[in-house]
Amino acid sequence: MNARVAVTAAVLAIGLAGCSGPSDGPVPPPVRPAPAAPAGPVATLGEPEELTSGLEAPWGLTFLPDGSALVSERISGEIERVPAGGGPARTVGVVPDVDVSSEGGLLGIVASPEFATDRLVYAAVSGRDQNRIVALTIAEDFGSLAVDRVLLDGIQTADRHHGGRIVVGPDGHLWIGTGDAFEPENAATADSLNGKILRIARDGSVPADNPGPSPIYSSGHRNVQGMAFGPDGTAYASELGHRAWDEVNVLRPGADYGWPETEGIAGSTGEPPIATIHPDEASPSGVAYAQGSLWIGALGGQRLWQLPVEAGAATGDPIPHFVGEYGRIRTVEVGLDGALWLVTSNTDRATWGGTDPRPGDDRILRVEVDPPRS
């Protein structure tokens, strides 16, 4: 094997970090257009500040009205609380009936907009027979939790490709990213909840303005682990690709995003992504919007990506930050003060693209975002 072939093989092997898994062999990606410079000034980042450490396989994060945050741990099924100013995380409780697999377990969480009065947190949970979305009640003293009700079930489970991100949109509804359960045809099947973006009301009902009478908002997704909304209400999602391209998409009601026939710009079916990144540099998970950019955590790529956007379009190519400095980044959220909170994922050794934990892993970092300057 000559040197060029060896390097190419190594790069493609690293691409497995994007939840690719076994296949019949590597598929060379198509040539991507030359990078485009941002159309104007973009936001910049300050120096990261460590808020807490010692977390075990953290996955989701959500803020409470007092500025503190709840963090879900995938394997333990625990929810931890981190003080607003940082400090040791303290256990709130364990979510029952969590079934752990290579990528499944307790995944995304999001607090109710009325948390101060209803004490509800919504969670994506992998079960033995199916995945589900549940409402949890958090005790007043943060010393326990209980399942209030199951909002949605019937989501096919598997060893991998669970999706798992859950957010509250500006419409007040729950938006849920699901994976194809390692069966690509699920993404294109109208009667499957897998490989979809789901949208339900917080009581579990289907909103009247959904594209159809089911929770399905869009289809043709491989594995969605990140969603965020721009100030104009535009919905963005990150998607883990297979061998060629990871994607950033703008979500439109009833739209098909092409999987499994199309992956990124490799194919001609479905809605085209607004940006693509090679899996060896990305394997995107959590997404947040702040100061005119999307901020995307990368697992296999071990970095934070910045994508300048405006009104549902990318205004420049992705910009990498912190390459290799903190390992895998699972979740990105915007705190009440506008700073980013980054959740690393280096103790989650069961998933693809693992890396040796650093001392203190896993941790949460706070990074201030400076607005674009003319």
Image (cartoon, helix red, strand yellow):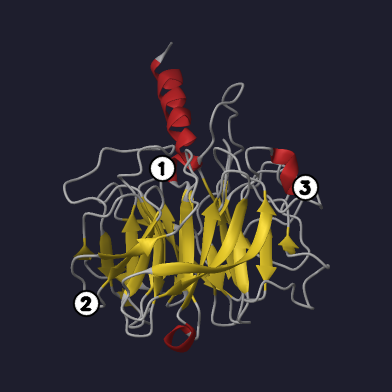
* Image quadrant containing the C terminus: bottom left
Q: Position of residue 304 (x, y in %)?
A: 37, 57
Q: Is residue 104 above or below residue 203?
A: above
Q: In the figure, is residue 287 to the left or right of 55?
A: right
**Where does residue 52 sit, x and y in percent of width and height?**
21, 63
Neighbor class of circle 1 (other Cα within 10 Å; few <14, some 14-19, many 20+) is many
Residue underneath mark 3: 188
| Residue at disc 1, secondary structure | loop
Q: Is residue 304 left or right of residue 260?
A: left
Q: Is residue 212 above or below residue 30?
A: below
Judge by depth and name the residue closer to the eye, 101 or 340. 101
* For discs 2 and 1, the disc positioned in front in the rendered view: 2
> What residue sits 75% from the left and 68% below the top?
253
Mark identifier at residue 300: 1
Q: Which of marks 3 and 1 is nearer the N terminus?
A: 3
Which residue type carries mark 1? Answer: Gly
State the residue in front, 116 or 333.
116
For mark 2, does the 10 Å Cα neighbourhood hold few (<14), some (14 to 19), or many (20 or more) residues? few
Amino acid carrying mark 2 in the image? Gly
How far apart, in angstroms, are the residues tagged by discs 3 and 1?
26 Å
Q: Earlier in the sequence, mark 2 or mark 1?
A: 2
Residue 85 disc label: 2
Residue at position x 34%, y 59% from top? 343
In the rendered image, the residue lying farthest to the top is 1
